[in-house]
Image (cartoon, helix red, strand yellow):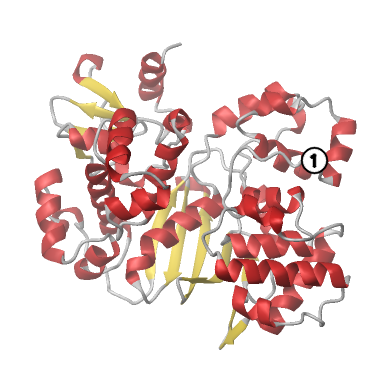
Amino acid sequence: MSDLQLYQQARLSRDPRFDGHFFVAVKTTKIFCRSICPANLPLEKNVEYFVLAQQAMQQGYRPCLRCRPDSAPKSYAWQGTATTVARASQLLHTHLDLSIREIAEKLGIGERYFRQLFRAHIGLSPKQFQLYAQILLAKQLLHHSNLSIEQLAQSCGFNSARRLQMQMKKLCNLSPSQVRQKKRPLEQDIRLTIAFRAPYDWPQVREFFALRAIAGIEQVSPNSYARFFCLENEQAWFEAEYDELHNRFKLHIKLNNITLLPKVIANIERMLDVNADVHAITQRLLLSGVPPECLNVGLRLPGVWNTFEAGCRAILGQQISVKAAINLLTLLSATLGEKQVDALYFPSPSVVAASDLSFLKMPLSRRNTLQAFAQWFEHHPQGDISEWLNIKGVGPWTVAYAQLRGISLPDVWLLSDLVIKNQLKKYPIRPELAQPWRSYLTLQLWTLA
């Protein structure tokens, strides 16, 4: 079946599994919608399909006010063609404050080549993509948040509310006040929603987080996950409440620096893995040999807030049980973390690097590894995780764990993990058939254990 036939069937059936995979643009109204939009279905001859909302906007379509394409789960199915383009799109989404030149530098390529590569794969320039991403985020926040227009403009990378209004009027033929049809009481806290593509195995995610929660930093309830975190020296907090009925999480965020909001939202989406292609992952896990009766439908990859915390978790968890590792992690946080009234923040690399860590009851060699890791991270906060292998005591398992949970790579295979080895003796698994979703196979086998 071709992609076009798949899109046609998914549109007609309003299949929620394809929400965010593509968008339906109606030629007669010049509006584009999610595949699950409840509006009357237009005739096939009057529609065209786009993989990205930005591509629909470039062709002159404006987002629907009813199904709100800006709130759809993101789709990464198109990204397999170029790793650089995939990383570039992520940076353009989350770093709305950076120029195209600065993003090209982060990618390690020239600005001219960046523009050529992006246009070849996406069909529009990086600047256009970034502007459309800003408008879509602004529209989402107008619908769901209680921010003032001025705060909202700043959080989306616009210099002023006037600039936001001008661009929204130009690209969507709507003003911010027209989008925000209901007046909301203004408050300092931020409240909004993020969608996920059903099914979502919340019990699996909740239990995973609960088993590994750091007391004082993370809180897990039957229907929510919350934590204190630091981002660019800003201390903040968020809570994500699972809303099964509407296929979404309701977010409550406390954040003083509003310009960091896109990065915070992107990291929460990664931690909760809301954009996973559930259908494709399920097919690959079954193909690799996972028995259908054992499969966790809607399996997700629960993340860690950042790579430093993921590295500390991995080093402290070497060759011991999960419970013992979390006890050490909780002790590390309680001893070296920054304490505020009713809040605890994970210790920074500099604080861990300066401590002799004698309070941790574990072999001296592992304490030395943790300290050396913190010292390395202090000087290379944006360093490649694979470079950790140069640190004495850090091996492939530690690096793979950090890639799995710290940056949520989808194709990490923890073959050296003891639990995985034991599970492979029970089930006739062929991991190569699970590519490029072996991270989910790792999670599936952990869950079965």
**430 up-or-down from 446: above or below:** above
Q: Residue at x 56, y 38 (%)?
A: 199
Quick one: SS at disc 1? helix
Instruction: Pick the residue in front: 20 or 234.
Output: 234
The residue furthest bottom is: 341
Residue 79 visible (yes or no) = yes
Residue 440 occupies which quadrant of the picture? Answer: top right
The residue furthest top is: 1
Q: Decide if residue 421 is on the left or right side of residue 344.
A: right
**65 up-or-down from 145: above or below:** above
x and y percentages locating residue 301 in the rendered image: 62, 46
Q: Residue at x 61, y 49 (%)?
A: 202
Q: Decide if residue 2 is on the left or right side of residue 323.
A: left
x and y percentages locating residue 262 in the rendered image: 37, 59
Quadrant into which the C terminus falls = top right
Across the whole image, how many numbered discs are drawn on residues?
1
Q: Residue at x 19, y 57 (%)?
A: 181
Type of amino acid under label 1: Leu
x and y percentages locating residue 445 in the rendered image: 77, 39
Which residue is labeled 1 in the image? 448
Q: Decide if residue 305 is on the left or right side of residue 352.
A: left
x and y percentages locating residue 177 in the rendered image: 14, 59
**345 up-or-down from 160: above or below:** below
Residue 296 visible (yes or no) = no
Q: Residue at x 27, y 48 (%)?
A: 130
Instruction: Pick the residue in front: 429 or 396.
Output: 396
Estimate how packed mark 1 is, as few (under 14), some (14 to 19) or many (20 or more) residues with alpha carbons within 10 Å. Answer: few
